[in-house]
Structure formats: structure tokens, C-alpha cells
Image (tube, coloured by chain):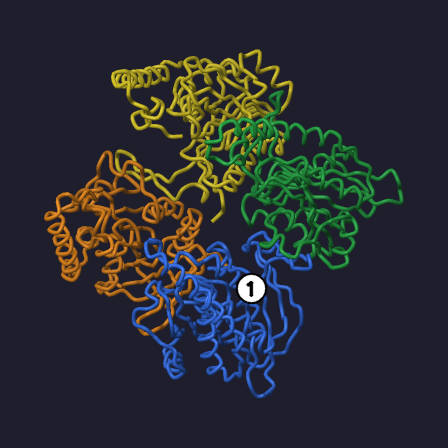
Chain colours: A green, B yellow, C orange, D blue
Amino acid sequence: MEDVVIRTIEKAELHDPILVEGLPGVGNVGKLAADYLKDQLPAKPLATIYSKFFPPQVYVSEEGIIRLVSNDLFYWKSPDSAARDLLVLGGDYQGISPEGQYEITERVLDYCHDLGVREVFTLAGFAQGRVVEEPRVLGAATNAARVEAMRAFGVVFSRNDPGGGLIGASGLFLGLGRMFGMEGVCLMGETSGYFVDPRSAEAVLRVLARILNLKLDLAALQAKAHEIDRIAQKIHEVEARSPESSAPSSERPREDLGYIG
Amino acid sequence: MEDVVIRTIEKAELHDPILVEGLPGVGNVGKLAADYLKDQLPAKPLATIYSKFFPPQVYVSEEGIIRLVSNDLFYWKSPDSAARDLLVLGGDYQGISPEGQYEITERVLDYCHDLGVREVFTLAGFAQGRVVEEPRVLGAATNAARVEAMRAFGVVFSRNDPGGGLIGASGLFLGLGRMFGMEGVCLMGETSGYFVDPRSAEAVLRVLARILNLKLDLAALQAKAHEIDRIAQKIHEVEARSPESSAPSSERPREDLGYIG
Amino acid sequence: MEDVVIRTIEKAELHDPILVEGLPGVGNVGKLAADYLKDQLPAKPLATIYSKFFPPQVYVSEEGIIRLVSNDLFYWKSPDSAARDLLVLGGDYQGISPEGQYEITERVLDYCHDLGVREVFTLAGFAQGRVVEEPRVLGAATNAARVEAMRAFGVVFSRNDPGGGLIGASGLFLGLGRMFGMEGVCLMGETSGYFVDPRSAEAVLRVLARILNLKLDLAALQAKAHEIDRIAQKIHEVEARSPESSAPSSERPREDLGYIG
Amino acid sequence: MEDVVIRTIEKAELHDPILVEGLPGVGNVGKLAADYLKDQLPAKPLATIYSKFFPPQVYVSEEGIIRLVSNDLFYWKSPDSAARDLLVLGGDYQGISPEGQYEITERVLDYCHDLGVREVFTLAGFAQGRVVEEPRVLGAATNAARVEAMRAFGVVFSRNDPGGGLIGASGLFLGLGRMFGMEGVCLMGETSGYFVDPRSAEAVLRVLARILNLKLDLAALQAKAHEIDRIAQKIHEVEARSPESSAPSSERPREDLGYIG
């Protein structure tokens, strides 16, 4: 079979579209943000991406219906016909091998290029290894003008972070995107790296909404963040009562909080 | 060499054939069931599937004759010329890499599509992590009508199982099958996950026989199940006499019972 | 680059040639036997096989000259013009991935088929997990007639060995060879599996010489075997003097005896 | 996408150019030497090499600008128009799989062959497993004449080193280079194998400069080496004060000295 199969669901004419990517990763920040964005706009299904570089796996819905793992491209036409349209890329997995990452990213970029995409925003989490109360949104970009532009929206460019670079789809969509004449920005929400982190996703979306001049209702994401806080607080209290515990709190709550990673 | 090589042994004209897949996996339930079905019908060899995604291995028969590891497709023409014919897929291995799983499944589906297959049943085990006295048969399907139809045959559709989806051939034959216009059902026999489990295979075949309106003599499979029970019972007795043993019984008997996995 | 590159060194016209394969493996028995056979005949270089499925490695000779790792095909023209010629395949490595094993074997078989090869002998070690004083030569073959023929030369066909089949080149050259219309035999010298075992290689060559009606001087191989015996004996004596040692003798001498495996 | 993508930055006419390769590896000796050479000449960017056999990673500069990981080819035109020009190959990574190593090396060699390269020098570290005060430069070459020629420049050819051959790009560029009609030499600076080792890189460059008749100012590399010495000395002193420490000093300072490997 082809390494990557892209099935178009609906042919859409898009106006100077911007691609927003958010796949599973650190704290699942990128995926949470992209999925929430897609639901809020709301964006409509445009194409499904299958690949032998994903796990050989199907999901089963609560109704018992099977679905092959995939990445999924949604589109949103701005009500303002002069404004730019959006493409949102989400999905179940990133490619599970380095070569798979390259292949999938390159094919999706090629497909998006044909749809007119010349600008990309990638959403990700940035693991700090400690609890982050007020997550900042760190940035990296394909050129200096964009770095400056992003600073105006509150994006933080740190001399040292991310020191080791970005690994995975959020970096690759920008790095390979340049070969397609695309420019772009990676927005990274600070997160502990231990939980799924809707608060960090919220911070990322808040910045993105300002940049793209979108009105997003973030209430449901905030509710999710509070629910996580509540659970984390409970765990904290239990541990406070058993101070002899040697395991750091960060290693406990994974199961409760549905860590995806 | 080609990634997947399919050698046709006999050209068969089949009437609206149904593909039944059962390869090695959890409790070896799918393979036990498919092999037993093939012997009971009896089905005849149609094609052999070799692949560089299988291990580089040959088996040696008791007579000293070598055979390259393979998957094998058998066919059965119903004595009732109005009834549908069957294809049964069994074999030594599933593809040993994710990409191999996709490649092999896609090629076999393509081959079966050319033979007229539009409907697929995949047989598998579902690991419960505990001894299962009366295995139920869980299901997953490609559409809602099939879910309903299967319930009438006693197949259980659980809201939560299988939570993480299905990994491997039994899921992939359905997930990729949809790209070939095929619909289908996965039948999963509950099993502990610790032994080869003929009792679970029997439960699966009993349901399948009802669905496909086949008459199958399951006596030999029951005998095998009783033999496994007898061994498990012995192990249980030995352990009952040494209650200080801390290892759970489920972890012991693997070697005795020929776990394949 | 091509997955497998075969460079012909000399074009040779061969009379109904037989391929003898011996690559690194259990006890290095196959490689020892094939290399010794090649030197004794002596056989001349015919072709060099490079592949990206070998390690990315060069060897450096004592003179400081670099050589890319390879497999190597040698030919021997029988002085009796009515007799059959030989091809001997040796080398530094087997393919280091399952797919690589298939690819390399298939390409070499294709090349040998063009040279007229229709019969293959593969040489290997069979690990018994214990010291073997008088190694038998076990066999496996592509058809029943060959099994019978081999018995007459003292080859042992055991109902249970090798139970799990053969993994690697020695099995694959026969298993894939059948797709090229080749028949053949695998000769497996019993060996502990812990050392490089020239004695087992000698046993294999002794049988092979009878089968192929070759005169081979095995003195140098015997000398090597005696040297290994002498070292093993010393280790045994040291251990006899320190009976409290808990490590089994078989686990010690690896380094001394240059295990390659 | 193509396995390896080579983007030409500037078309250069080169006079009988020599390729000098230095990629990350043992003690990072080869990379340190090639990068320093490139800066000192100075050499200009000629081409960028991307590959799906590199990690799916981008680096972020201190200014927040993203750059996809790559290998990079630089050229230097000798001011003496009768003298030979140079190509210098450096980069972030070697291919991360054996197949990737072969593919990338083969494609870069092909590209360099088109530029007229017929001679290759590869730079590497040779791990001695102990502190090396005065690193020698060991050699390996593609033919005997080159071995002799190198001895005159102080390159050491040892009967036993490197016993296991060379693994990775420095060996492969010579081993595969021969298929492109290229001859060459590997220069290996002795190093402990525990640190990034600028002193070893300096030793290699000193020899290379003599061979290629280049004038190189090595002061900055020496300064780097002294800085490493100073840190190592401090660690040594700390350990001398805590003699009960059981960990060998070589296992400690990795983090401080920025080991890359």
C-alpha cells in the first residue's frame, strides 16, 4: 500500500488558508488545543490520513463501531469572506518511527500546499518537569519577522528553551514546511510533562485566538482544567497526610488523570 | 523481492465468499478457531502468502521437510449452490512490524477483493487478565446494522471493551477492509491471556457457526479444552498445597500449556 | 542505493553448480565450514555482495587497508569435467533485520539461479545447550527423497529437532530457494552454542565431503578444535579447584574462545 | 519524500576537490575537526542534506529561529589556482539506522562524485577507554600506497587497532567511496571516549593540515582543550578528596563536559 493514504472527504475552496497542527505529544497540549479549536469553530471534515507508520490498530466506539487510527484534517471558512480560512490537523498518533514522521508530515504538507497553505501554526507542550501554575506560551518561528510579530501577542522567546530543539510533528511541520515555501510558528504551552494539561492548552489557544483574530469560548476547556486541578489537589492532600511516602507526587496521578504523553 | 508474495495454488470460482481470518494472537484464540474451522469444513488450499515481514524462518516437519513460514488461504464451496462460499485465512505469524502488518493485510485484502470478498469476520481473543470460566464472545463491527445483527447471535457489545481498541490483524482486516468496500465483524473470545485457550476458540466458533449457518462438530476442540483444564487443575492443586507461594497461579503454567501469545 | 549490490569479479561458466552456504551463526559452525571448504578446494572469488542490510562497517586489515563488510561468493571448477562445480557463499554477517535477511537471500538466490544453481546445501550449528563430545550432523531437507538420501550419509533426522524451526540464512536459502526451483539440504552440526566450534564444523564438512564426493584435508580444522579443547580443559581445571563457584562453566570461557555467535 | 534530499545552495566549479568528512561520533572528534576546519579556511555553504534517516527534529537558535537537522557541505577554493579545492562535510547527526547510514553516505558520495571528488579524508575519534595525554592519530586507508604516504605524515598504522573495524560514516565514506572510484584515508584521533575531545581534534587537524598543505590557526581549538582540561582537573581534585568513591572518574564528568558521543 502507499506509505500514506489521504482520503478527501469534501473538496473545499479555501481562501489563503492557515494550517493549525495539534497532535498527541507532551501533556497532550497540542492535541487538546487543536481538537478544541476544531469543535469550537466548528470546522468540518476535509480529509482522513491513514498510514502504515501509525500503529496497526482500530478504535471501537461505545456503540461497537470500528475506526482505523488516523490523522484528520478539518476546514473552517471564515464568515468574513475577506478573512483567511483555517485548516486544523488533529489525530490519534504521530508517526511511530522517525522515517514515518518525515513521510507523513511531508505528504500532509504536500496536500495542504495544494489547498493553498503557505502559513503554519503548530501547537505543542513544553515539559518543564515541575508543576506550572501559570503556563507561559513559548515560541519558535521560521524567520525573525515572525519572532517579532509573536512577541507582540505575548509569546515568549527564550534564549535557552527549547535547548535540545523540538522533536516530532510540531517541529517537523515547520522544518519541512519551508521546503514547500511555508513559513510558520510553533506555540508551546508550558506544562509539567506529567499530566494531560488542558490549562496549558487553554493558554496556547488564548494566544492563537489573538493572533488569528478568532473568538473562542474557552469555558469547557477551563472546566476540564479545574477538574484536573481538583483531582491533583486530592492526591496532594492524601500525600500530605502520609509524609513518609517517598514517591514524588508527580509519579502518582498519571492513571487518574489520563496521561497520554 | 516483493514485500508480500501471494502464490495461488488453485484457481477457484467462489460464490459471494466471506473471509474468515484467524491468526496467532491473544490466547491463540483466533488461530485455533480458524485452523479448526478449516479442518472441519474441510477447506482446501487456495493460496500461500510469504513476506519479508514475517520472521526469516522455516519450520521442519517430523519427517525432516522444510517449510517457509507463511499465511495460508483456504476455500470452501458450500454444498448448497445458493449459499455463500468461505475463505479461511490462517498462518504461522502476523507481520512482525507495524508496517508489515499494514502491508500484508492490504495485499491479502486486495487479493481477496479480486476473489469477490465483500464481507469479513475476524476471530481473536480478548485478554481479561483473570481466569474465565464461561467465555463470552465480544464484538466490534464496521457499522451499526451489523452490531444489531450480531447481538441476535449472542455477541456482546460492551460500552467499555475493548477500551484501547484492537491491535493487530483482527482489527486491521476490518479497518483496512473498508477501503476495499468490505464490511465485517470481529468476534473476540474472552480468555485469561495466560494460556492457549481452546475453550474460548470453541465459544467463538459456536457463535460463528450460528451466524454462517454452518454445522461444525466441536468435539475435538472440547477435548483439547478439557485437557488444558486438567493440567490447570493439577497446577492448582500443587499450589493449594504450598499456600505460602506468592506467585499468582496465572503466572506459572505457561510452559506447561504451550502459551503462544 | 540498491538494497543489495552484487559485484561480479569474474564471469565463470559453471557445470550444474551446487551452492554451499555458510554464514556466521550458532557456534559459527556454518561460517567455519564454508570458509575452510573454500580454502581447501581452493575456490576462487566470483562475486562480492554489499548491502545496506549489513552493519555500516568496514574492517581494517593488519596492513591498514579498509574493506567494506560483505558476503562473498567463490566458485570451484571440478577437475573432472563431467562432475558438478561448486559455489561457496561465506561472509562477515547475515542481514541484520528480518527484512534484510529476506532481501539479501532472495537476491543472492536470483544471482545463483542465473549461474545455473538448482541445488543448495546450507551449513549451520545446532545449539544443544550442553557440551557435545561427538557432534552428530542433523538434517532438514526440501523433500522426502533428499531426507532418505542424506540418511545414507549418516545425517540424523530427528522427529523433534529442530523443534522451533530454523531461523536465519540457513533456513531461508532453502525456504526461498524453492521459489527459484531449487531443492536442498541443511546440515547442522551439534554444538554447545557457547563457543566457536571447529569440531562441529569438521563433522559437517566430513559429511558434506562424502555427499559431494570431495577429498578434503581436515587437519587444520582438527588442530583448531584441539586448541579449543585445550583451553576449555584449562578452564575446567581452574573451576574444579574452586568448587564454590556458582557460575556454570559454560558461561565463562566465551571471551577466551572468541565466541562470535 | 525522497530518502535523502540534497539542496544545492551555490553551484561551484571546483578544481580536483578533496572531500573531508567529520560527523558526530566518538568524542565528537570528527565533527569538532571538520567544523573548525570549515570556519578557519573559511569554507562557504554549498549544499544542505536532509533525510528521513535523521531524527524528526528541528533546532531553535538563540533568536528563536527554527532549523531542520541536516548535514552540510561547504567548499573552499584554494587561493593558489593550481592547488586542489576542498569540500568539508559536517552536520548534526549521522543516519540513525544502519540502512540510513548507507543511504545517506551513498547519496552524498554520488553528489560529490558529480562535483569531481576522487579522494576522501574522513575524521574520527578512536576510543581508548582511558585518558590519553598525547593523542596519536591512527589511520586506515583504501590502498597500500596511501598507507605508506600517511606514515610519512606521522599517522600511526597499528596491526591491531581498530580491531573490530570502523562503524559509521567515517568507515562507510571510504568503503562505499570505492564504488565511486574514490580512494581515501581515515584519520582517527585517540581519545578516552568519555568526553568531547578538542585536543584529539587538534591532533587530527594538525596532521591533516600537513597532508593538505594548509595553514591553520589552531589556537581557538587549543583554548577549548585547555578549558576541558581545567574542568577535568577540578573533578579529579574533588574525587581525590573523597577516595572512598567507588565510581570511576570517567563515569562522572560527562554532563559537565557536554558529552555528545
- Front residue of A138/A250: it is A250
Name the quadrant containing residue B179.
top right
Query: Which chain hosts label 1?
Result: D
Identity of the residue furthest to the front in this view: D241
Residue sitting at x 16%, y 46%: C135
Residue sitting at x 37%, y 24%: B195
- Above/below status of D259 relative to D188: above
User: Does residue B172 appear in the picture of this structure?
Assistant: no
Residue sitting at x 68%, y 29%: A226
- Front residue of D116/A60: it is A60
- Above/below status of C202 relative to B28: below
Where residue D88 appears, as percent x and y from the top left, is 55, 72
Question: What's under tag 1, amino acid-wise?
Answer: Gly
Q: Is residue C134 left or right of residue A106?
A: left
Q: Which quadrant holds the C terminus of chain B? A: top left
- Front residue of B8/D59: it is D59
Where residue C179 appears, as percent x and y from the top left, is 40, 45
Where residue A18 appears, as percent x and y from the top left, is 77, 46
Identify the residue position indicated by label 1 in the image.
D91
